[in-house]
Amino acid sequence: MCTAVEWWERHQVVLYLAAIAVGAVVGLLVPAVADPLESAINPVLGLLLYATFLGVPFTAIGRAFTDWRFLGVVLVLNFVVVPVVVFGLSRAVAADQAVLVGVLFVLLTPCVDYVIVFTGLAGGARARLLAATPLLMLLQIVLLPVYLWLMAGAEVVGAFDPHPFVEAFLLLIVLPLVLAAATQLLAKRFRARRAIEGVVLAAMVPLMMLTLAVVIGSQVFGVSSALGQLLIAVPVFVVFFLIVAPLGALLGSAARLDVPSRRAATFSGVTRNSLVVLPLALALPASFALTPLVVVTQTLVELVAMVVMVAGVPRLIRPRISTAENV
C-alpha cells in the first residue's frame, strides 16, 4: 500500500489531468450521466474535505485563528484587490448581461471548500486557510449584492438568495470538520480508528481524482452545447488567474508571511466559489439562462489552473532554506 501511495503522490499532477480528461470524455459521449454525476458532487466533495480535515491537527486550526496578519492578507486580497480586478475584466463582457452576471457571480466569491485541498497539495497553510473560511463565507454573503449592484445594476440584486451559501457551509465545511475532529479523538483511543484514519489520508489523491472527474463529467456537455456564446468568458477567467496569482504572492510577501501562508493566500485569491454560486445562478429568471453555464465554464478553467498551480506554486513560492514546514 505504501508503494502505491508513494507512486500516486509522485505522479499526482498527471493523474489529475487524466481524471479531468476522463470526466470530459465520459460527459461528452454519455450526456445522460450529467444529472447523476451532478447529484454526486456534494457527497464526493464532502468526503474529500473530510479526508483533508483529517490531516490537519486541530490544535493548528486553533493557533491559526490568532494569525491576524494572514487573515488580513486573505481578506484584503479577496474583498479589495479582486473586486477591482474583476470590475476591469468584466467590462469585456458587459454587453451581454447574462454573461456579465455569471462572471461577477463566480469571480467575486472566494472558494471555501476544495481550495483547502489544493492548498495542502501545494504545501500551503491549510489550517490557516480553514480558519479563515467563516469570515470568507460571511463577507461574500454580505458583499456580493453590493458588488452586483455596483457592477451590474439593481436588476439582479433582488434575485440574490443567501441560502445556498449557508447550506454549502454546513454540508461541506461544518459536517466534514466535525466528523474529522471526532475521528482524530477516537484515533487516540482505538487502534481500529487509527487504521481508518491512515486509509482515508492515503486515499487523498484518488479522492481528488474522483472529484475532478465527477465535476467535469457532470458539467462539460452543458458547456459544449453553448460553447460559441461562452467562449467570450474564457479569456476573462484565464486573465483573472494570470493577474491574481502573482498579486496574491506579492501581497503575502509584502506582509512578510511565511512560505506556506503565501502559498495559501495565492490559492485563496485565485480559487472561486463556483460550486456554491451555481444554485444562485440557476435561480435567476429565464433571461439569464446562460449565466449558470458561465459559472460552470469558470469551474472547468479553474480546475485545470489548480492542477497547474499544484505543480508550479511550490517552485515559484519556495523557502530560502529548506526548513519551512506546512502548518
Image (spheres, rainbow, N blue to C red):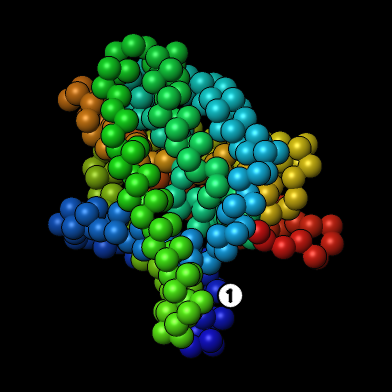
Nearer to me, 143 or 37:
143
Task: Tell me the residue at 79%/57% (across/down).
Answer: 319
Instruction: Report x, y in % for residue 26.
Output: 26, 63
Residue that numbered label 1 is attached to? 10
Instruction: Report x, y in % for residue 7.
Output: 54, 81
Judge whether 326 appears above or below 264 on screen: below
Residue 247 lies in what quarter of the image?
top right
Tally of numbered tags: 1
Task: Tell me the residue at 62%/57% (across/down).
Answer: 60
Name, please, the residue furthest toward the right: 321
Please give left or right for residue 58 compared with residue 163 in the image.
Answer: right
Judge whether 252 appears above or below 193 on screen: above
* Disc 1 residue crowd, few under 14, some 14–19, many 20+, Cα 10 Å: few
Instruction: Report x, y in % for residue 316.
Output: 72, 53
Residue 278 in sight: no
Task: Tell me the residue at 55%/28% (across/down).
Answer: 79
Question: What's under tag 1, amino acid-wise?
Answer: Arg
Name, please, the residue furthest toward the left: 32
Q: Quadrant of the C terminus?
A: bottom right
Residue 218 lies in what quarter of the image?
bottom left
Nearer to me, 197 or 311:
197
Please give left or right for residue 14 compared with residue 206 in the image.
Answer: right
Judge whether 210 appears above or below 72 on screen: below
Quick one: SS at disc 1?
Answer: helix
Judge whether 200 appears above or below 298 on screen: below
Nearer to me, 24 or 241:
241
Task: Tell me the residue at 80%/65% (across/down).
Answer: 323
Please give left or right for residue 25 compared with residue 310 in the image.
Answer: left
Residue 159 in sight: yes
Name, please, the residue furthest toward the front: 189
Instruction: Report x, y in % for residue 168.
Output: 34, 44
